[in-house]
Amino acid sequence: MASDGGSSSLQLPCVFSPKSRQYLALCAQDGRLRVWNTDSKTLHQEYVPSAHLSATCTCIAWGPCRTLKEGPQRKKRKSEAVQAEERADLLAMGTAAGSVLIYSTVKGALHCTLDGGHTGGVNCVQWHPKDSLLYSGSDDTNIIEWDLQSGKTRSVWKADRAAITGLCVSPDGKLLLSAAYVIKLWNLETKEIYRKFTGHSTAVTTLCFATTRPPDGNGLYFLSGAAHDRLLSVWQVRDDGRDKNSVVSFTLTDEPQHINLIPSNSKNEAVRLAVVCKDGQLHLFEHFLNGPCKKPLSPSCTVQLSDTKDSPAPIPLLAAALATETRTVMLAYGNHLQPVMERAELNTSERHICLTRDVFTNLSLSTETNVSKVKTPFSAKSKVLVPGLPGHQAPKGSSQASEKRKKDIDTKEMSIAERLGEIDLATGSSDKGAPKSTASLQTDNFAVLLVQGLESNDANILNKVFQTRKEIVIKKTVARIPLSAVLPLVEEITKRLQGHPFSAKLMVQWLKAVITHHTSYLASLPDLVTQLGVLYHMSENRVKLLPKLTKLHGKLFLLTTQMATNTSSSAVMDVDHAAKLVYEEGKCLPVFLLSVVLNPSAWDSDGKPQNIVTLLTGTESSQCR
């Protein structure tokens, strides 16, 4: 039986149904749960978050297949009874508000709500394989055992000092694995720690048992994966307690995003493992777990998808599920809003396989199908979440919009563009006399808009985000974006740095914030040089030109200063250096002054003395007689 690993709260959940793989359940950026039929490749059901859901979905787990009781009916055949037993029905969804929702795919409605237990967001949920029990781990560091028959908590205990990010129940239902930074194995009867496993430096996001419990007790294996870690570690639970280190490691190209495996029931049966990484690649492993292996194991086969364009672009894989046949794998790829499902036959003897698919053709075919049978439960007090990061709550709309929504529920739903238009991007006025704005732009809105702009390549959204000049807003926005958006943000910054110098000046602040907050993630990328090559060479060339530009700036400054000095000096009038009055030493000064006064030209027609300069100028030099 294949078992699916849990997904981290920072990732968008995407899980195939057990056994038949008939359904694919996922939550997209718009906060809605969609269940797709893998056989008909159409949308089977859609659950719109209503008043029961106050935050987006963070994790998903399918319940064990069960026999459905739908009242007295005609006697069914054995084949029909077997199909009814293998049908998946219940789906557990953890939310960022701390509640757990149980959704029924048969009823097409919410089965029950488990709330009042967690005070933080739910990061992982896990079903008990035999009893009607459900386990959930949260940011409040607690594990809750839920009784699904009564809908109440059966047991609550503190599992770690940090947030619980992974859970997994053993195949026999007696042991429970929990993970934060340390992996703990619990006895479900006594709720006591049975073993502790340390070895991961970051939060463990993936836990899954790889074997069933054999009679000797030393053949129980499980695997774990951590955030920003490109290794899957396999641990052995031994009765003698000599299980401090991992026994096997599987190498990956990126952090594991989705895991599916078929466990082995004996030493002679190999474990088959399918891992989808964040870079969109699928890695297949097959290994006999019969003891420690010092050398890390490489995948036996790596699968990539690309489109059919002249310059092929990679298509990211979302999830994968192994079938009983060795070469058959169920694939889900594309995007979470409109995924493409395919049952592919792979030649696992080849180490690398590249499949080319025309995603746009498949999307157009899926869009043309009739989806009128989709069940969308809506209550009178429904609330539509704005697309964005997990845990982001929608801002309160106007009363007129809410009343219109209540009156006309069956009308056409708003598109993503219309929802973005309702977000108030106006900031408060800085003037004292101006009225205060009722809704200001929050920092988390910047992060939401930035992620949406990068995913849709919408220039208008990106311009609204990048126009801010506040350094603290830039730092907080970059710190809150998911890791999957870091590389697209760096590529957008690189493209804008090559444009107008004014835009480049603003982009330098964003680039500084990205390098400050996400250096560890960028350093862990295997192809960092290839992805950041353009930015590196552009920075190197500009740094080399800086001394030359500085010298040129200095020379131009000297030339302009000299020209300004010459212009100002030429504007000064020439001074007449000829003497207007000469006085010779030794001459008689009174006689000289008397001659000046008696000069007829020194007086005007009215008998008033003229200007002294004119008087002195018109007088020739006199000598004493």
Image (tube, rainbow, N blue to C red):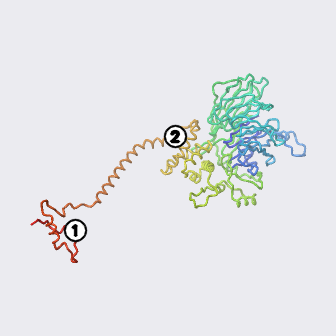
Query: Furthest-bottom residue in view?
Result: 606
Q: Nearer the viewer, residue 240 or 333?
A: 240
Percent position (x, y) of residue 444? 63, 49
Q: Amino acid at mark 2?
A: Gly
Position of residue 500 in the picture relative to residue 17 (left or right) = left
Q: Which disc, if any, is residue 533? A: 2
Position of residue 71 in the picture relative to residue 574 (left or right) = right
User: On the image, which quarter does residue 526 sit in?
Assistant: top right
Looking at the image, is mark 2 or mark 1 earlier in the sequence?
A: 2
Percent position (x, y) of residue 420? 64, 54
Q: Amino acid at mark 1?
A: Ile
In this orientation, does residue 476 appear?
yes
Query: Would you place residue 600 above or below residue 210 in this image?
Result: below
Q: Nearer the viewer, residue 430 or 101?
A: 430
Query: Would you place residue 266 above or below residue 36 in this image?
Result: above
**Residue labelled with disc 1:** 612
Q: Nearer the viewer, residue 305 or 412?
A: 412
Query: Would you place residue 574 above or below residue 494 in this image?
Result: below
Secondary structure found at label 2: helix
Percent position (x, y) of residue 461? 59, 53
Q: CA distance from mark 2 to mark 1?
A: 84 Å
Query: Furthest-top residue in view?
Result: 240
Secondary structure found at label 1: helix
Q: Residues within 10 Å of mark 2 (few under 14, many from 20)?
A: few
Which quarter of the rendering shows the N terminus?
A: top right
Query: Furthest-front residue in view?
Result: 590
Percent position (x, y) of residue 211? 74, 29
Give the mark toward the camera: 2 or 1. Answer: 1
Which quarter of the rendering shows the C terminus?
A: bottom left
